Image (spheres, rainbow, N blue to C red):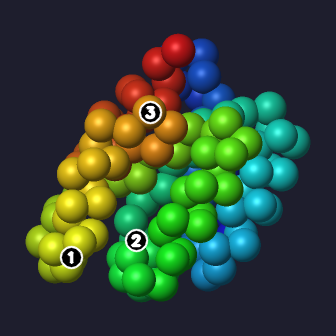
Amino acid sequence: MRVESFEKDGARILECVEPIARAAEALDLVSTCFEQRSQRVLIESRNLPAEFFDLRSGFAGEFVQKLVNYQIRLAAVFPSEAGYGQRFREFLLEAKRGRDFRAFSDRAGAEAWLASP
């Protein structure tokens, strides 16, 4: 997993720019956040594995919970809800109102939320 950082309105945001393969990579991401002095992460849906979208696998819950436990804000961009199962669409609906993990349909919205205090 490769991570790049950028600034948005004075906030340092880390972005996963390569696919995530294992839920355990959340801890690698936590370490990178501490090293980079950032508590904000952006992930595009194309960099999430198929297991993330199958809630029965536990991948999404484990991955997100690890970041939330370390008070890291996570924004994920899902350009379209089409093609996902009913349960995952329900998960996205709830995540669009989340406090520490939030789902967005566009990158601009995700970046604005991450940059907000």
Q: Point out the tag, 1 or 3, that comes first from the N-terminus.
A: 1
* Neighbourhood count class around disc 2 (C-alpha, 10 Å): few under 14, some 14–19, many 20 upward: some
Residue carrying label 2: 46
- Image point 30% across, 37% down: which residue? 97
| Amino acid identity at mark 1 | Tyr
The CA distance from mark 1 to mark 3 is 23 Å
Q: Point out the tag, 1 or 2, that comes first from the N-terminus.
A: 2
| Amino acid identity at mark 3 | Arg
Residue carrying label 3: 99
Q: Nearer the viewer, mark 2 or mark 3?
A: 3
Q: Nearer the viewer, mark 1 or mark 2?
A: 1
The CA distance from mark 1 to mark 2 is 13 Å
Residue at far left of view: 82
x then y, percent, for residue 94: 27, 48
Q: Nearer the viewer, mark 1 or mark 3?
A: 3
x then y, percent, for residue 100: 50, 37
Q: Quadrant of the N terminus?
A: bottom right
Residue carrying label 1: 84
Camera-side residue: 55 or 117?
Answer: 55
Helix, strand or loop status at disc 3? loop
Camera-side residue: 46 or 69?
Answer: 69
